[in-house]
Image (cartoon, grey):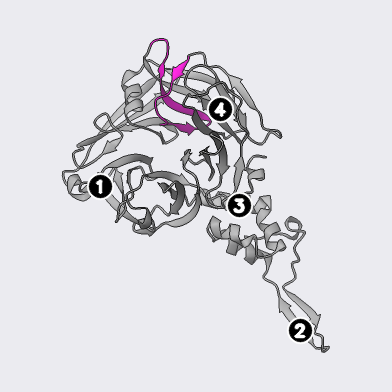
Amino acid sequence: MSVTEDRLPIISRRSKRTKISPNGVEENSFQIPIDLVFEILLRLPAKSVAACRCVSKLWGSLISRQDFTELFFTKSVHRPKLLFTCRKDGKLFFFSSPPDENSSADSLVSFSSSCRVSRPINGLVCLERDVKKTNETVRVICNPSTGQCLNLPKPTTTWSGLRIHNFFVYEPIEKQFKLLLSCGIHEHLVLTLGTGELSWRVIEPSKPHCIHRLSNICINGVLYYPATDMSSTDDIIVCFDVSSEKFRFITAIQGFIQAGHDGVLINYNGKLASLVSKRSRIVDRRSKSIELWVLQDVENQECIKHTYVLPTWWQDIVGTGCYTFVGVTRSKEFMFSPWYQTVPFYVFYFNIEKQTIRRAAIRGMEALQGHTVLTFLDHVENVKPLSLCFS
């Protein structure tokens, strides 16, 4: 990579500097070339890059430059990681790990109060934290890799006593992050980040619906989640267009809808899909097969069902563990992860084309043994200041 002088006008390109010591003797000091600084920083994990901001004002300025943060983000997209969250003693811990066999998880950040966490988007997550002193719920956008946080304004609602569902979403064309709140009855609230003064807007879906649980996925600017139609009590899949902020509903294909309610919604090659086993999102030694339901056409509500039989030795490799679906990797492997931190901690990959299963041991989280773990695929490290993420 070559960094031209006009791209970094604040940094000298000289590699050698001469100064006069107090006794009148010339001394030479060498600066690291900017090209080399860039290459060094691009090879570091995001947590280390964030620490490098404190090296000097020069380094802090360099790391905050938009051209550097964009380049780092682009490289991170091609080397995604696993992200783990785990709760213990009222704290929420974040870890990341490369998706390779027998890797070690890096501890990222932790929060001192119990939180609910969203699926990560472009390296960011939304935390919902209950503040006991004020009996309020605070929502925070957090970058687990750098520890940066942004407190969001409190919504003014009359939803007292109702369970509010949070959906952190992203619109890729306009590059906008939004937060959708729903109490599962009538009105919803939307907050667009990066619009100056943050304010909530009220939107009303054409079909009032009740949300049972937060199995959701955002694909190409559309949020999908399972719900029940309040007027007919039928199960449906809700489609929320992040750009237009309009709702649509999948109602006609009951097999796909049922799989979406019982299993886990995933992104399968850019299409909405669901993984389910025995009408459940759990797999264990008793599981015989896995169903993959893929929505082929949203407008015409057409889907395809694939059934994959697990090998006979599946029960021997998983033992007595209980695993949940995480998603499908870029190499078309189904990934399963334990509900709880175990020692050793294994994640499993089922290759649907080769009909093979491999497991990977993740070290570094042993202190959280016995506590609930959430696992996410394709986590991207992001060193952008939050102000640039939402600009």
Specify few, some or many for label 2: CA neighbours under 10 Å numbering under 14, 14-19, or 20 or more.
Answer: few
Residue at point 56%, 36% (across, down)? 134
Which element type, helix, strand or loop, lies under badge 2?
A: strand
Residue at point 61%, 30% (across, down)? 191
Q: Amino acid at mark 3?
A: Leu
Residue at point 36%, 27% (across, down)? 260
User: Is residue 228 within the magenta segment?
Assistant: yes
Measured in 3D between alpha carbons, the distance from the residue under mark 4 to the one under mark 3, in whole angstroms, is 26 Å
Which residue is identified by label 4? 242
Which residue is identified by label 2? 27
Measured in 3D between alpha carbons, the distance from the residue under mark 2 to the one under mark 4, in whole angstroms, is 60 Å
Which residue is identified by label 1? 356
Q: Is residue 136 above or below residue 202?
A: below
Residue 71 in sight: yes
Measured in 3D between alpha carbons, the distance from the residue under mark 4 to the one under mark 1, in whole angstroms, is 38 Å
Which element type, helix, strand or loop, lies under badge 4?
A: loop
Specify start and end residues of the magenta stretch as a single range. 208-232
Which element type, helix, strand or loop, lies under badge 3?
A: helix
Which of pointers 1 and 3 lies earlier in the amino acid sequence? Answer: 3
Q: Are marks 2 and 3 in contact (CB under 8 Å)?
A: no
Specify few, some or many for label 1: CA neighbours under 10 Å numbering under 14, 14-19, or 20 or more.
Answer: few
Which of pointers 2 and 4 lies earlier in the amino acid sequence? Answer: 2
> Which one is closest to the eye, mark 2 or mark 3?
2
Which residue is identified by label 3? 71
Which element type, helix, strand or loop, lies under badge 1?
A: strand
Which of pointers 4 and 1 lies earlier in the amino acid sequence? Answer: 4
Q: Is residue 94 above or below residue 363?
A: above
* Residue 86 locus on image (x, y percent): 41, 47
Which of pointers 4 and 3 lies earlier in the amino acid sequence? Answer: 3
Q: Are marks 1 and 3 in contact (CB under 8 Å)?
A: no
Residue 352 in sight: no
